[in-house]
Amino acid sequence: MKHDIAQLGAKVLRQTANVVADIGSIDARQLIEDMLSTLASTQGVGLAAPQIGVSKQVIVVASRPTSRYPKAPFMEPTIMINPLFVNSSDAQEKGWEGCLSIPGIRALVPRYKYISVQYANEQGFHVELELNGFIARVFQHEYDHLIGKVFLDRVESNLDVFSEVEYLKLTEVAF
Ligand code: NI
């Protein structure tokens, strides 16, 4: 079932999400289904459970070209439960981000370019992946939602914050 997206200011976006202990349970399956259908109804490329009001450590990474991110690479919607990551290098790069919980705003956000992630998939199997570039960015953005942070908290300067109207005027969008 499609849910409303929690908007900035909602407490659930500022809480540390709980570990999912019951992967495969009816509740966990329902949560995943709700996240996938909610994300599919948007132009977003990722979603975290707190954004539909559930303070649990589940994210979906679903990079795809959309009107919000026309140059995004394609990745099948991937459910990541209890995700963790380490940066594989200290190099960060700034790229544009937005958030379904913060409509109308875009900002340049520094993120690690290369990361190693691990998580449990919806069957409960342990998965390890190396991510880079835009998909690594989406992961780090969604992971932040699980620790009560939003992309604006990572911005280096207020000058890197744009209205979406101005962002869309930029001809070359650098992810
Ligand atoms: Ni977000």
Image: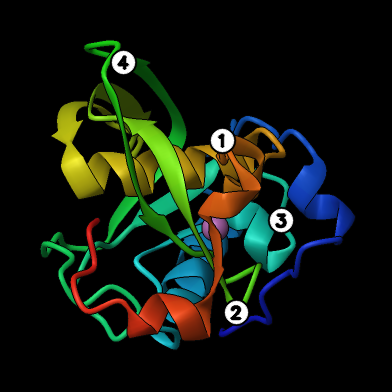
Secondary structure under the numbered disc 4 in the rendered image: strand
* Dot placed on the residue nearer the N-terminal end, 3 or 1: 3
Q: CA distance from mark 3 to mark 2?
A: 23 Å
* Dot placed on the residue nearer the N-terminal end, 2 or 1: 2
Identity of the residue drawn at 37% across and 83% down: 168
Q: Are marks 3 and 2 in contact (CB under 8 Å)?
A: no
Tell me the number on the disc at residue 26: none
The residue that disc 2 covers is: 104
Secondary structure under the numbered disc 2 in the rendered image: loop
Residue 105, position in %: x, y? 58, 70
Residue 126, position in %: x, y? 28, 25
* Dot placed on the residue nearer the N-terminal end, 3 or 2: 3
Colour setting = rainbow
**Mark 2: amino acid:** Gly
Q: CA distance from mark 3 to mark 1?
A: 29 Å
* Dot placed on the residue nearer the N-terminal end, 1 or 4: 4
Q: Look at the picture and state if 76 lies above or below 167.
A: above
Answer few, some or many: residues within 10 Å of disc 1's Cα (few below 14, many 20 plus, some between 14 and 19). some
Q: Quadrant of the C terminus?
A: bottom left
Of circles 2 and 1, which is in front?
Answer: 1
* Dot placed on the residue nearer the N-terminal end, 2 or 4: 4
Of circles 3 and 1, which is in front?
Answer: 1
The residue that disc 3 covers is: 54
Nearer to us in this view, 125 or 164: 164
**Mark 4: amino acid:** Asn
Of circles 2 and 4, which is in front?
Answer: 2
The residue that disc 4 covers is: 87
Q: Quadrant of residue 22?
A: top right
The residue that disc 1 covers is: 156
Q: Is residue 171 left or right of residue 149?
A: left
Q: Are marks 3 and 4 in contact (CB under 8 Å)?
A: no
